[in-house]
Amino acid sequence: MKFLPTPVSGAFVVEVDARSDDRGMFARTFDARTFADRGLVPVYPQCNVSRNHRRGTLRGMHYQAQPRPEVKLVRATRGRVFDVALDLRPDSPSYLRWASVELDAASCNAFYIPAGCAHGFLTLEDECELFYQMSEAYVPELARGVRWDDPAFSIAWPFTPSVISERDAALESYSQEASV
């Protein structure tokens, strides 16, 4: 596996070393020891799947607040998405910066998003599915989010979403008082 740094401190694009032959392809997508040796979270007690039917579906920008912020390891298992990590950690050198990666099921790449960062994605084609490995169990009372189009961040989405939930559309703009 290769860990490619991003503009967000502690966030990495994880690329696999795929082996292909006449049967198809094989790749190791996760190894706890490799992650631990790099100082990254090696244990994920919860996994989630997100299925999205239409191109232009936006989910985000979500995070879980203290005392149980989550690390996320996100991978597209079908389709392609524009995936974003937004640093909301006031003590981080990349505070209020964002990083993006195109997650593509064909490449088996993943995005390691550190605790304290908000996460969101925009589907680039119909019928996308994402698989999330989470370092913490979901706690509804700690669920938070910020607007995907907040001018405080100026995230360069590839196009305007056409599908967004009422909850995500109603998220507030960011303020330091509401930070993680």
Image (cartoon, rainbow, N blue to C red):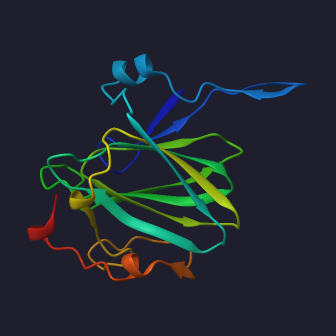
Which residue is at 33% across, 38% downward?
135
User: In the displayed structure, does residue 140 sit left or right of residue 129?
Assistant: left
Q: In this rendering, is residue 20 above or below 61?
A: above
- Based on the displayed image, in which of its 4 quarters is residue 173 positioned? bottom left
- Is residue 161 at all visible to an observer of this figure? no
Q: In this rendering, is residue 140 above or below 146?
A: above
Which residue is at 70% across, 63% downward?
127
User: In the displayed structure, does residue 29 sit left or right of residue 87?
Assistant: right
User: Please, which residue is most extreme toward the left here?
Assistant: 177
Which residue is at 67% across, 47% downward?
105
Q: Nearer the viewer, residue 175 or 45?
A: 45
Q: Nearer the viewer, residue 151 or 24?
A: 24
Rendering coords of residue 86 (x, y %): 33, 59
Rendering coords of residue 61 (x, y %): 37, 66
- Is residue 27 at all visible to an observer of this figure? yes
Rendering coords of residue 17 (x, y %): 64, 26
Q: In this rendering, is residue 4 above or below 57?
A: above
